[in-house]
Amino acid sequence: MSAEIILETEDLTKEFAGFAAVGGVDLRVARGSIHALIGPNGAGKTTCFNLLTKFLSPTRGRIVFKGQNITDMQPADVARLGLVRSFQISAVFPHMTVLENVRIALQRLRGNSMDFWRSRAVLDQYNDRAMELIADVGLTEFTNWNAVELPYGRKRALEIATTLALDPEMLLLDEPTAGMGHEDIERISQLIKRVAANRTVLMVEHNLSVVADLSDTITVLTRGRVLAEGDYATVSNNPEVREAYMGVGHA
C-alpha cells in the first residue's frame, strides 16, 4: 500500500440475509485529505462507516489502516491505532461541564478507569490540555456550562473536542452538520478545516455545499456500491451521479 494512502478497503462487503448493504467497495483515502462519502438514503454509507470502525464485521473483504490489516480487530483496538469515529464513541456527560467532559476524555489516554474515583488534583493535571482543546473548538466562553445547556451546534463541537482528546490520526465524521442552521453549519465546517490541518478526515455528509467546500475527494455510493469518485466538479457533472443522487436525469 502506498505511503500516501492511510486507509484502504478491498472488496469490502456486508450482507444481511443475502442483501448486500455494502457490496465490493474499494476505497482509498489519502493521508492528510478530507474525503467525503455521499449518496442517497440507503446507499450504504453508515454501514460502510460501521465496517471501518469495526462496529460491524464484513462478510468478506479487507480493511487496511496505516499498512496494517485491521479487518478482524475490535473497535477499541482500532481506536488505539488512531482511527476514531466522532459522536459514536465520544463521552459527553450531559450534567457535567464542558471542562469536565474534556478532562474525562483526556484521562482515557491513561487507560485507568480508577481515575474516576481519585481526587480533584488528579483531574486538574489535565486542565491545560483540556483548555487548549476547548479553545480549538471555539468553546472557551462555555467552559463552565453543563453539556445539556449547550445549543445543538456547540454540543457537536464538544463531542469533537472529546474525540480529539484521543489524539486520532484519522477522524470519521458521521453527518457532522445534520440538523443545524446556517450559522452552526459554518462554524462546524470551519472546525473541520482546522481539525484536518494535521489529520485525515473521512465524513458522511448530506449537505452538498459543505461537501463542495471541504472535500478533496468524494466517493459516491449507491445501492452499496461505488458509483463515482473524484473532486466535486467531477462527481457533480457525472450524469449517473446526477440521476442517482440528485434525481436529475441524463441530459
Image: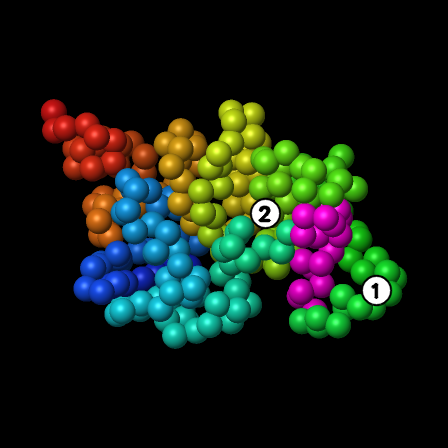
Element on which disc 1 rests: helix
129, 245: nearer the viewer: 245
Residue at the extreme left of the image, as rendered: 251
Other residues around mark 2 within 10 Å, as few (<14) / some (14–19) / many (≥20): many
* Residue that appears at 53% across and 52% down: 86
* Residue that appears at 26% across and 63% down: 16
Q: Is residue 109 magenta?
A: yes
Ranked by sequence position, the earlier of labels 1 and 2 is: 1
* Residue that appears at 66% across and 66% down: 109
Query: As shown in the figure, which amino acid type bears the numbered disc 2?
Result: Ile
39, 194: nearer the viewer: 39
Element on which disc 2 rests: helix
Give the mark count. 2
Whole-percent x and y of residue 4? 40, 57
Disc 2: which residue: 160
Other residues around mark 1 within 10 Å, as few (<14) / some (14–19) / many (≥20): few
* Residue that appears at 58% across and 35% down: 153
Whole-percent x and y of residue 219? 30, 46
Query: As shown in the figure, which amino acid type bears the numbered disc 1?
Result: Val
Residue at the extreme bottom of the image, as rendered: 72
Quarter holding residue 31: bottom left
Disc 1: which residue: 122
Quarter holding residue 106: bottom right
Q: Marks 1 and 2, how far apart in space?
A: 24 Å
Q: Is residue 39 magenta?
A: no
Residue 77, above or below 48? below
Q: Can the viewer see residue 32 in this picture? A: no
Residue 232, above or below 73? above
Q: In which quarter of the image is the N terminus?
A: bottom left
Q: Is residue 90 left or right of residue 24?
A: right
